[in-house]
Amino acid sequence: MSRRSKLLIAALFLVLLGIPIGYVLYGWNIPDPLRFQMVAHKTEPEVSVPVTMHHMQIEVRNTSSVPVYLASGVLFRDKANAAMYNPWTSLEPPDSLTGLTLDFNGIREPIYIPAHGTWRGRARGRRPNADAVDLSQLTIRYQYASPPRLAILHRYWSACLYLSDSIKQRFVVEFYQRATAPVELSAAQGSVNNAKAP
């Protein structure tokens, strides 16, 4: 084989190798890709105690050109509570009774949100009747991953099945990214902001 042919094969190999590497690097770090908007809110007083249940419907919009897997979303009444990690409630699928995602053998399956796509979830939280709920102050802290991150995370989980606890403790890996965002109000919800529970 001539030297020129070897160089062409090597160049082709490098190009083919660079495609998956470039894909991983492009989608590895996506800063703060999700936006949250409350599209519905209603209250339901509880009869036995002076507490009101707040039912919220929240739309999640992916602003990036890369799909995002939403692993968790914790709602706080304001930024101060978010900073102290004093949660109010959490985001969950509309038909779920157990939270945002279900666990299967300890592995959490996140929600897939396509590039520039949306997903709609709900949140339910109790507050004493005397408390005013300022919807404009709601803040969410969430965990998410891009497809390359999640693929490597799944491989890491698979490898952990065959590793001893002592080895796993040496390799504590955080594949999910974290971000904090305000929960914006839709035009309809803005008119009922600061509503006091009945």
Image (cartoon, rainbow, N blue to C red):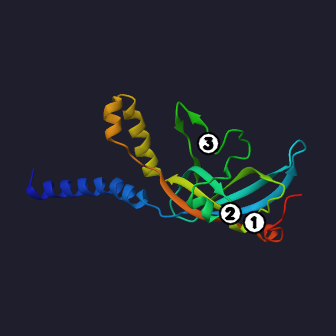
Inspect the image, locate mark 2, and give the three-letter code of the amino acid beneath it: Leu
Circle 3 or circle 1, nearest the eye: 1
* Point 12% across, 59% down: residue: 4
Residue 71 pos. (x, y %)? 56, 48
Say which of marks 2 and 3 sits in front.
2
Query: Compared with residue 7, is residue 169 higher up or lower down, i.e. above or below?
Result: above
Q: Which quarter of the picture shows residue 197?
A: bottom right
At 86% from the left and 51% from the top, the residue drawn is 44
User: How far is the residue under mark 2 from the one under mark 3?
Assistant: 21 Å
Q: Disc 2 on helix, strand or loop?
A: loop
Q: Position of residue 67 (x, y in %)?
A: 53, 56
Q: Quadrant of the C terminus?
A: bottom right
Closer to the chain start, of discs 3 and 1, is 3
What residue is rendered at 61% in x and 38% in y?
Answer: 102
Distance, label 3 to label 1, CA atoms, is 27 Å
Report the amino acid beneath label 1: Asp
Q: Nearer the viewer, residue 101 or 19?
A: 101
Q: Position of residue 148 (x, y in %)?
A: 43, 51
Kind of residue at disc 3: Thr
Q: Residue at x 38, y 46 (%)?
A: 173
Disc sitting over residue 59 in the figure: none
Say whether marks 3 and 1 touch (CB < 8 Å): no
Residue 109 locus on image (x, y percent) = 56, 41
Tell which circle, 2 or 3, labels the residue nearer the N-terminal end.
3
Left/right of residue 85 with respect to residue 44 in the rendered view: left
Whether the residues at callouts 1 and 2 have beta carbons within 8 Å, the answer is yes
Q: Would you call the spot at circle 1 few (<14 residues within 10 Å), some (14-19), or many (20 or more)?
A: some
- Mark 1 lies on a secondary structure that is loop
- The alpha-carbon separation of the residues under discs 1 and 2 comes to 7 Å
Q: Which mark is residue 101?
A: 3
- Give the residue pinned by disc 1: 134
Task: State the mark number for residue 138.
Answer: 2
